[in-house]
Image (cartoon, rainbow, N blue to C red):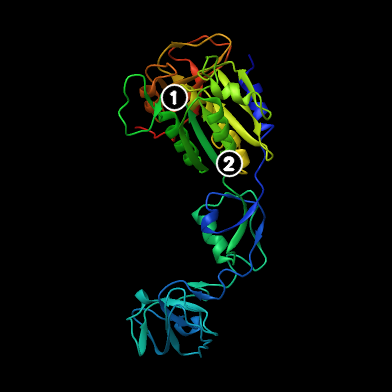
């Protein structure tokens, strides 16, 4: 039997960041930037108005007030999108819209709210200092400035900046393509009521959804029969489109554990008992000329889910150029007592809550590796060290989040 740390180290020491590719900006959403990006243009690209109002020489309205208004002729309208170079003489004004280019000579914008809104002539009721309500060219980003570092994960805000500085395509680490294969003669597709001896392929759907939730690209191959040649041909054909493969089922000590039987003879696959509960039977290695990582997970649903969280998700993040762990373990106070197996790391399903002063961890019902009900109700895993055999109410436990925790008052 090997430790959780040994199995994890083998995985993270094997997987590699995927080679970078060029993608259009929207296709790159969620990917990690593989190269620094410098701006091709200044932002703003031209000096423009920060609001609707009137472009003026600030000196012309320095004495304006409601008691001593200043009246100026309006000699032009400037809309956003105007491409005509304009100049403003002293003693005149131009009506200007938000984002429209400032005329040469003007150094301030009087908000329309500080005027009578005139069209041919305008009455200005308040002064504005020079530079007021004006966005200077390049004040946000200068041409040639480094605007984004390699390693940045691209979300909506980052994509907006990249577009604004002239990037239409960027070099990124792509999202891993992950094939999920569920094995077992007993499996049937969701939406069909199982007959005696049949089981709905909930594992395949769960792991596919988990890959998608991780912002990777899943391909599900469900309900593969346990006959050796059928399984082998299935996985060989799937390697063509996979950056990683996840299987579930067939890795224990049973007479029909085909996954272990077949894959033990190929690639660098290794099958071990890992000192953890749930999820003891694990397999990992690489297959094919491209050395595609293959994770063989147990068939019990909770074991498969825990194995994905502990081993697969960090590996896929590394392949995508992300941090292996993007959230930290949180410390919580146990509200219940429970036992843990000697010599194994326990991943107990819990309901984690925050009461304003700290986190509280409550056991999430039945802890059997088959128990889907308590798994669905859990939002975290309490990680109990191998040398701890009991948790008492009031003990502190470290918890791995399965979803964001909402604070309750």
Give x and y (percent) for residue 99. Answer: 46, 74
Whether pointer 2 and pointer 1 mark residues with C-beta atoms closer than 8 Å, the reply is no
Quick one: 328 or 77, which is closer to the camera?
328
CA distance for labels 2 and 1: 24 Å
- What residue sits right under mark 2 in the picture? 242
Q: Indicate whether 149 appears above or below 344.
A: below
Residue 94 x/y as whole percent: 44, 85
Q: Is residue 187 left or right of residue 344?
A: left
Identify the secondary structure beneath mark 1. loop
Image point (41%, 81%), residue name: 64
Classify the position of the N terminus by image quarter. Answer: top right
**Closer to the camera, 184 or 310?**
184
The crowding category of the residue bearing disc 2, from other C-alpha atoms within 10 Å (few below 14, some 14 to 19, many at least 20), is many
Disc 2 is placed on an element classified as: loop
**Is residue 357 something that shows in the picture?**
no
Q: Can residue 185 be seen?
A: yes
Position of residue 149 measured from the top left corner of the image (x, y, whole percent): 65, 53
Q: Which residue is mark 1?
A: 185
Residue 205: which quarter of the image?
top left
Q: Residue at x 44, y 11 (%)?
A: 338
């Amino acid at each position: 039997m090997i430790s959780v740390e040994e199995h994890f180290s083998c995985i993270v020491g094997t997987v590699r960041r995927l080679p970078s590719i060029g993608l259009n900006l929207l296709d790159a959403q969620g990917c990690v930037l593989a190269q620094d990006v410098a701006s091709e243009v200044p932002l703003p690209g031209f000096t423009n108005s920060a609001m609707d109002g009137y472009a003026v020489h600030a000196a012309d309205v320095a004495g304006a007030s409601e008691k001593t208004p200043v009246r100026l002729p309006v000699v032009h309208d400037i809309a956003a999108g105007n491409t005509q170079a304009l100049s403003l003489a002293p003693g005149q004004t131009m009506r200007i819209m938000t984002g429209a280019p400032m005329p040469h000579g003007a150094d301030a914008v009087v908000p329309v709210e500080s005027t009578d809104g005139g069209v041919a002539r305008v009455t200005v009721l308040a002064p504005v200092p020079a530079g007021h309500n004006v966005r200077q060219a390049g004040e946000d980003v200068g041409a040639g400035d480094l605007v984004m570092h390699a390693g940045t994960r691209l979300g909506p805000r980052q994509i907006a900046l990249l577009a604004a500085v002239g990037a239409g395509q960027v070099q990124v680490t792509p999202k891993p393509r992950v094939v999920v294969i569920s094995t077992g003669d007993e499996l049937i597709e969701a939406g069909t009521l199982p007959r005696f001896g049949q089981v709905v392929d909930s594992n395949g759907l769960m792991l596919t959804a988990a890959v998608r939730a991780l912002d990777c690209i899943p391909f599900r191959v469900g309900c593969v029969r346990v006959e050796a040649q059928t399984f082998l041909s299935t996985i060989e054909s799937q390697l063509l489109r996979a950056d990683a493969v996840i299987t579930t089922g067939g890795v224990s000590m049973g007479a029909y554990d085909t996954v272990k039987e077949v894959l033990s003879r190929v690639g660098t696959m290794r099958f071990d008992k890992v000192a953890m509960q749930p999820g003891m039977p694990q397999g990992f290695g690489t297959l094919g000329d491209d050395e595609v990582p293959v994770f063989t997970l147990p068939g019990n649903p909770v074991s498969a889910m825990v194995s994905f969280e502990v081993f697969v998700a960090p590996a896929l993040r590394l392949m995508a150029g992300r941090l292996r762990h993007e959230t930290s373990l949180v410390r919580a106070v146990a509200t219940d007592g429970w036992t843990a197996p000697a010599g194994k790391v326990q991943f107990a399903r819990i309901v984690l809550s925050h009461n304003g002063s700290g986190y509280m961890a409550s056991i999430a019902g039945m802890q059997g590796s088959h128990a889907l009900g308590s798994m669905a109700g859990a939002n975290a895993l309490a990680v109990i060290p191998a040398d701890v055999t009991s948790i008492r109410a009031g003990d502190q436990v470290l918890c791995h989040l399965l979803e964001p925790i909402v604070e309750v008052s």
